[in-house]
Amino acid sequence: MAILTIEEAASQHEAGRVLAGIDLGTKTIGVAISDRSLAFAHPKPVILRKKFGVDAQALLSALPDDTEAIVVGLPLNMDGSEGPRAQATRAFVRNMDRMTPLPFVYWDERLSTVAAERALLGMDVSRAKRSERIDSAAAAFILQGALDRLQALGVGTRF
């Protein structure tokens, strides 16, 4: 299984490639894509979950051809332990491993949905629109955290 730490992803980075970030919800999959300089995460439309095979194909179809790795939000409990949602996320990644050669990077997603909700509230996004965008906004927060760590490791463009 191709699971990398963020440090391993940094050491294997090829210039000009992008990273994808995902937030696995029970009803949707939030998706975000980085820019080529690995500075910014951009949310993309959510994927409505149906069953694994359909979800996996929709996710892989949403990724650009120059995607280098997929950063997956790992929903840890506040004490750092793993509960059922983290186990479900790990199972999703194990199943995805058979469908793509892309490596995965787990990223602690604690409070990412809260941060995304606050950002959308700050932009005065209506409740209906927030519910449509929250998972992709959370995916962007997850990916941005990983991108910031890569920047600290000297990968990507610094501004």
Image (tube, rainbow, N blue to C red):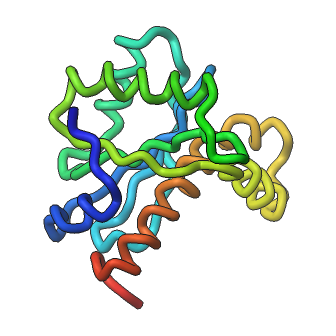
Q: Quadrant of the C terminus?
A: bottom left
Q: Estimate the x, y position of residue 89 in percent, counting from the top left.
A: 49, 28
Q: Is residue 15 left or right of residue 122?
A: left
Q: Estimate the x, y position of residue 17 in percent, counting from the top left.
A: 21, 61
Q: Nearer the viewer, residue 130 or 108?
A: 108
Q: Quadrant of the N terminus?
A: top left
Q: Quadrant of residue 37?
A: bottom left
Total labels drawn: 0
Q: Is residue 135 above or below residue 34?
A: above
Q: Is residue 19 left or right of residue 76?
A: left
Q: Residue at x 16, y 62 (%)?
A: 12
Q: Quadrant of residue 104?
A: top left
Q: Is residue 21 above or below residue 56?
A: below
Q: Quadrant of residue 76?
A: top right
Q: Residue at x 31, y 41 (%)?
A: 63
Q: Is residue 57 left or right of residue 79?
A: left
Q: Estimate the x, y position of residue 144 in percent, counting from the top left.
A: 50, 63
Q: Nearer the viewer, residue 134 or 75?
A: 75
Q: Estimate the x, y position of residue 147 in percent, counting from the top left.
A: 42, 67
Q: Residue at x 68, y 35 (%)?
A: 132
Q: Is residue 151 above or below residue 56?
A: below
Q: Is residue 127 above or below residue 116?
A: above
